[in-house]
Amino acid sequence: MTHRNRFCLTAALLLTVLPCSLWPQPKLARTPPMGWNSWDSFGTSVTEAEVKANADYMAKHLAKFGWQYIVVDIQWSEPNPQTHGYRPNAQLVMDAYGRLMPAPNRFPSASDGRGFQPLAAYVHHLGLKFGIHILRGIPRRAVDANLPIFGSDRKAADVANRKAICPWNTDMYGVDTSLPGGQAYYDAIVQLYASWGVDFIKADDMFGFGPNGDHSSEIEALSRSIAKSGRPIVLSLSPGTSAVNQAAFIAQHAQMWRISGDFWDRWADLKRQFPNFTKWNPYVKPGSWPDGDMLPLGRIGIRAERGDPRMSLLTHDEQRTLITLWSVARSPLMFGGNLPDNDPFTLSLIANAEVLAVDQKAAASKELFTHGNQVAWVAEMTGSPAKYLAVFNIGDADEAVHVDWADLGLPPACQVRDLWAGKDLGASPASRTFQLAAHASAFVKVSPNK
């Protein structure tokens, strides 16, 4: 036997005996994922044409800045979804094994059982990546019909956990992964997604509430199925958790996870994210990204769950504060507005290479201080003596925020560059005071004099 054949045989034997969680896997999401998600604009009702229009815009205007994921959010299998909420006991398109399929009237290329493969191919042809939303569990309609589970001798009713249900959507039952066929169900749906070319899964209702709210077994089962699929699929968990004590477990199984409930274009929502990012900051690392949620910027609410069609209700200062905070905290960036409707200001928020570089390339970041309504964060880059300073006024009146360079670990003689303006501000000995309007921010690079 040659050395090559002996190596291959050894590898094959290892794969048959090692548990999936120990299989060698590529490290995914080395930087915070950046993309577009259909939810803030189209809610439950996005169409194939709208997905393609956003993909085309991203490829043309944003890919060069690192934006790459196009994600179809919830209810893509429902032929007749409703806006401003969910239809109880909704009709869903499924295959013979109870696996949800895209509704062909909304996604014409999915007809004849092709699923999302044609749409994923379209997105991939643009040089981008394709993602979908899924809701935890198995369709109730599949359970009622007791459909077979692909790759198993069990049926849907054998694995359904009828107590572990979503409190805000009636589509699914939970899956009891301790029962024969439970893991097989997750294997079956992920195998299907992988065959379509899916690169990103946003798994919802993974952080539950109440006596039946521990869904850790289903998180682990879905993660295991992704590993077994052989396709590098990024896993994002929703709808939000405050359980910092579960950070190690979550990070073991997912690449990003929500740290709050749904985030909308309201200052109150944005203000609440400051302590959330501080709390989760110790767990930020490549492949593990606490997620502040989608960016409700640009034109949103076209057919959304909340509100009517509008440009983001956040002021321009608040929108810059949002992007500054997400970037310095190194959160994933998932744009929620309809990209083709972007105005020049909205585009300037998501096409600033110097600001986005902090989100994507910083080696460390942390809150520097919170003094009343004044907040400061600092980030650093590997191999650079410069520090990236973000200062915020979260109050409702003007504030003067003062920062000493010594508190950044820098010498007195420093140069300052405004990242948003892309402009050098010159020397600023020992410190700087930032005059900030209510809800405004500043984002600067502070470099020691050479």
Image (spheres, grey):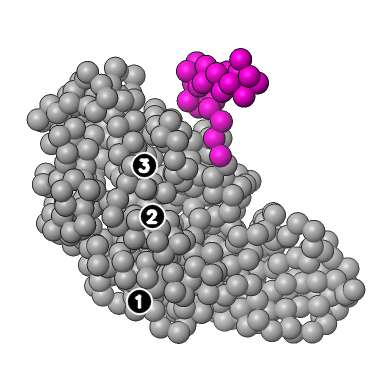
Q: Please give the range of residues in magenta.
A: 1-26
Query: Is residue 15 within the magenta segment?
Result: yes
Image coordinates of residue 1 in percent, x first then y, are: 61, 15
Which residue lies under the disc numbered 2? 130
Q: Is residue 391 left or right of residue 199?
A: right
SS majority, magenta = helix
Residue projecting furthest to the front: 1
Q: Is residue 146 left or right of residue 433?
A: left
> For the point 84% across and 65% down, which residue is it?
410
The answer to which of marks 3 and 2 sits earlier in the sequence is 2
Image coordinates of residue 83 in percent, x first then y, are: 18, 62
Circle 1 SS class: helix
> Which one is nearer the viewer's eye here, 11 or 24?
11
Q: Is residue 136 above or below residue 276?
A: above
> For the point 49% across and 53% down, which residue is it?
291
Give the spatial CA distance, label 1 vs label 3. 29 Å
> Which one is nearer the viewer's eye here, 47 or 236?
47
Amino acid type of the residue that numbered disc 3 sits on in the rendered structure: Ala
Q: Is residue 207 above or below residue 59?
A: above
The answer to which of marks 2 and 1 sits earlier in the sequence is 2
Which residue lies under the disc numbered 1? 340
Amino acid type of the residue that numbered disc 1 sits on in the rendered structure: Pro
Image coordinates of residue 185 in percent, x first then y, are: 28, 29
Which residue lies under the disc numbered 3? 194
